[in-house]
Image: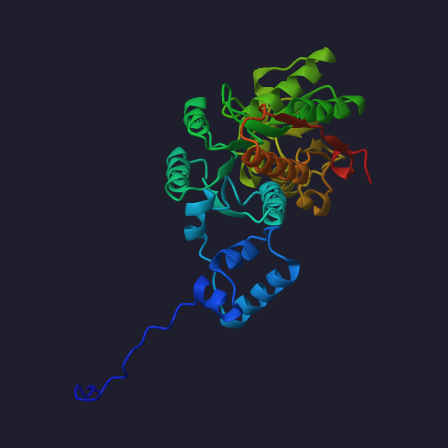
Amino acid sequence: MKENSDRQQPKKTRAHKVTLRDIAESLGVSTATVSLAINNNSLVAKKTRQQVLAKIEELGYVYNRGAASLSTGETRTIGLAVHDFTNTYFTRVCASIETVLSKNDRMSFLCNTNESLERQKRFISALIEHSADGLILCPAIGTVADDINPLVRQGQPVVLIARDIEGAEADFVGNDDVLALKIATEHLIKLGHRKITMLGGGKSTSVGKDRRTGYLTAMREADLEVTPEMTIGCDSNFEGGADAVKKVLAASQPPTAIVCFNDRVALGAISELFERDLKPGRDIAVMGCDGIGEGGRAYARLSTVNVQKTMMGQTAAEILVSRLENPDQPLKRIILEPKLVIRSSCGAGN
């Protein structure tokens, strides 16, 4: 149906945007008082602040953080980038980071780099353009110190989590990944296993290198041989674990136990074993690492090493907030200790 062009259109008017001045005039105070009240400054009496907040709610005033940052030098925003949001390991880490930042009146902007250096670079550039106050980063594969140090030298606080970068002039919070796979492998050795294969890990990240070092250290200290086919690289996910177990079972002399780079690899391995009518813990022992929730709910409950995900995120956020308040404090390097969790998949739990 054709619209009648002669029909008079309603006149559009721009709604009045409530300002600090409107709040101040309605209360008979200065705009400076309103601004101080919004920022919870101790110079403003409690009663006055309550009146300001009540009037803000009544008039629907929205605080202009961008304008405020011109005078304070802070945007109260933090960049948070990890390489894989689909991993529930990072769900826990990011949630704990967000909790700390929220308590400190800061907001995070999230990026899933998906192991893309280009995406990571674009995100960091955007943070700088928008004057973010700092960055918490689990680096994508291939990140080097030269990607981090210029930011720090320009006054951008950076805290690395999980994956360390050699030579980076940034704070770091991670888990003792060497110890994590060492105690996992030692547990299998104590159960009597002598041929133990490791799935996943490698040289592309500090976590991969450290966890493989932990496995090799435990095997060497027990005088057990490790041949090339006993360390099988794979993607660090469910599908990678399932594919890697196919190679394990195709060997002329399969191992009696498998220790995995992480729980997702282990869960994929367990699934493939069930597909072949093999029971984890009875026919072949399986150990994971990370302590994600899915492991405790699997049909064959996963033995694992629980790394401190919540504590890692919480500590990283606390360090960043502290560095924003005291930029010249010494660099911090926090390594958290893992804990063995024994369940049925290794043949020794309930």
Q: Is residue 200 visible?
A: no
Furthest toward the left, the residue is 6
Compared to residue 99, the image places residue 202 above or below, namely above
State the scheme by which the image is colored: rainbow
Q: Please name the residue shown 76% across and 31% down the image.
A: 340
Q: Foreground residue, 304 or 325?
A: 325
Residue 177 position, x and y percent, is: 64, 26
Q: Foreground residue, 86 or 347?
A: 86
- Quarter of the view holding residue 207: top right
Q: Is residue 303 visible?
A: yes
Residue 149 position, x and y percent, is: 44, 24
Q: Please name the residue shown 73% across and 24% down the image.
A: 183
Question: Left of 28 or right of it: where is 265?
Answer: right
Residue 230 position, x and y percent, is: 61, 21
Residue 196 position, x and y percent, is: 68, 23
Q: Foreground residue, 169 or 88?
A: 169
Compared to residue 152, the image places residue 56 above or below, namely below
Q: Quadrant of the C terminus?
A: top right
Question: Left of 31 or right of it: where is 279?
Answer: right
Compared to residue 224, the image places residue 57 above or below, namely below
Q: Quadrant of the N terminus?
A: bottom left
Q: Foreground residue, 167 or 206?
A: 167
Furthest toward the top, the residue is 223
Q: Please name the residue shown 60% across and 34% down the image.
A: 319
How many marks on residues? 0
